[in-house]
Amino acid sequence: MPLFPPLPLSIFRPPLLALQLPLRLPIRSRSLSSTPCLLKKQMPPRPKLDPADIDGSYLKGTGPGVVKCQETRSRSQNQKIAMEILAGKVELLEKGDQSRAAIVRETMKRRKASKARKSRRKYRKLEEEKKVKEGGEEEEEEDMEEEVVIEEKEEVVEK
């Protein structure tokens, strides 16, 4: 009786299935998400207008109530974008500082100011480190100059 059982013939054939499967190597990767990160404080909902209240026409014009929108080549997409812009303008007139547009603008303003403060702190710290480093080098240079002067005087005395 053999010590090992007989091997199936499929082992000796080239494994075609193994070539088709992707190799799973232990690769470290970041997880990607298509959803935006949640803010600690939620923004107010986007304003909506009733399409029945709006009379739309496609012509050249300016003035109150006119929204110019040429973001895309598609008329339907431009109409949708124009409705969002108009809804934001109406909400801004109704609510003022409490509107979504004003809150978003204020949030962006705060973020920009925070970045500027952080940048100023960073470069102030680098400047201080540079001054401290230069101050240390200047002292070393002064010591070197004193040593050179002392050595020159000694040479004169020896002659």
Image (tube, grey):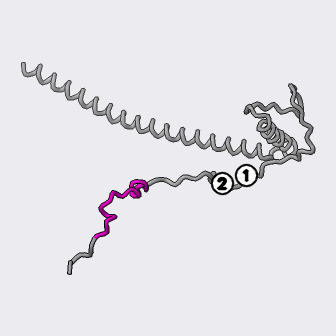
Is 31 one of the magenta-colored residues? Answer: no
In screen coordinates, is 69 left or right of 10? right
Residue closest to the far bottom: 1
- Name the residue carrying label 1: 43
Image: magenta residue range: 7-24
Q: Does 156 appear above or below 82?
A: above
| Along the viewing direction, whichever of 143 and 118 lies nearer the viewer | 118
Q: Residues within 10 Å of mark 2 (few under 14, many from 20)?
A: few
Residue at point 92%, 38% (across, down): 55
Picture coordinates of residue 5 (x, y %)?
A: 26, 75
The CA span between labels 1 and 2 is 8 Å
- In this rendering, the answer to whether 7 lies above or below 152 is below
Is there CB contact under 8 Å for labels 1 and 2?
yes
Amino acid type indicated by mark 2 = Leu
Membership of 19 in magenta stretch: yes
Answer with the quarter of the image where residue 113 lies: top right
Q: Quadrant of residue 40?
A: bottom right
Image quadrant containing the N terminus: bottom left
Image quadrant containing the C terminus: top left
Please report the residue visible at 18 percent of the width from the left and 26 percent of the height from the top: 150
From the viewer's side, name the closer residue of 66 and 148: 66
Tag of residue 39: 2
Label 2: element kind? loop
Estimate the x, y position of residue 143 in percent, counting from the top left. 25, 31
